[in-house]
Amino acid sequence: MKKSIFYTLMLLVATIAKAQQNHRYDPPWNTPPSSSVNFTVPGINNVPDLFGDIEHPQLVVFFAGNQFMCIDELINGFKKKYPQYDRVFAETLPPGILAQQIEGGSLTLGNLRITHKPDVYTAGKGRITQMKDYFDRTEVYAYNKLALMVPKGNPKNISGIKDLGQQALRVSMPNPAWEGIGKQIETAYVKAGGKTLHQTIMQTKVADSSTYLTRIHHRESPMRILYGQSDVAPVWYSEAYYQQLIGHPIEMITIAEEQNIRATYMAGKLKQAPHPEAATDFMDYLSSNEAKLIYKKYGFDTE
């Protein structure tokens, strides 16, 4: 009987260890808010791109997803400066998905339907400009560039963008349909290898599945690298910087300046913001030196 109990316990320990190993790099990578019950279950119940208080928020911000690493300090800093706002809700989904949510008025995630209208929306300059009629104020607050993320040790010996055209190389590529970075990377492909390289990566390799088009790039690409599903991922510099910052086994390959791009991040205060005063205060905070230092800490440029 004692042996039976011992073997059962050993099996349970082994099962738990295997589950932890299978999900050892899973998000959330931010610090979750405190609560009476924490029921995050890796691989099953895990919603890392919804932040804060979804019920009766005093401010709602839709951030282009690749800024997720800044949210903890950004929201805490804002609350400290403006203590009248205790309940803040934020989303860090792909900017194209957020734009559809703004235009359509709702988003369903699993069994959860969200109908909050944002007070502030942040994205690349191009998308904010396309949607300019939605806003009564816009501000530039940060900049970024591209880099390549590879597993630690760079086992495929990748040295630059041209290597992504290799037939056997597995590429994790942001889908340009809803990821602003996708179009920026396509520009970099053309700069590095002309239309031929672009066609190879975005058509030939997509057709044979050696280029994988992501659904939510800022989460998928790092995880595909960390779990050995892809060999290389073109990402924002800040994303590779952050994965190194938190100790994940990846490396960053820098991209030559002449093949790179510079992205401009803009925030827009919506004309129909449900909380206009809070929206104005947050726009002021996002433009402040304090907020810029937070972005700089996580690998963004601020000037």
Image (cartoon, helix red, strand yellow):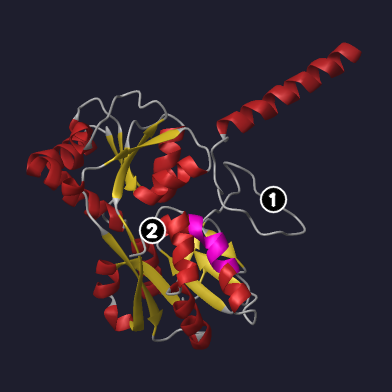
**First in sequence: mark 2 vs mark 1:** 1
Question: Residue shown at 35%/76% (left/top)?
Answer: 139
**Spatial separation of the CA atoms under disc 2 and disc 1:** 25 Å
Q: Looking at the image, which residue sits at the far left?
A: 195
The magenta segment: 69-76
Q: Main secondary structure of the magenta part?
A: helix
Q: Nearer the viewer, residue 102 or 70?
A: 70
Task: Specify whether residue 231 is painted magenta.
Answer: no
Q: Secondary structure at mark 2?
A: loop
Q: Which residue is mark 1?
A: 39
Q: Which mark is residue 94?
A: 2
Relative depth, front residue between 86 and 198: 86
Q: Position of residue 160 (x, y in %)?
A: 23, 35
Q: Quadrant of the N terminus?
A: top right
Q: In the rendered image of this protein, does residue 100 appear above or below residue 146? A: below
Task: Look at label 1 and name its amino acid.
Answer: Phe
Measuring from the top left, give residue 242's x and y in whole percent: 46, 47
Local crowd size for mark 2, using a 10 Å CA cut-off: few (<14), some (14–19), many (≥20)? many
User: How many marks are shown on the rendered structure?
Assistant: 2
SS under mark 1: loop
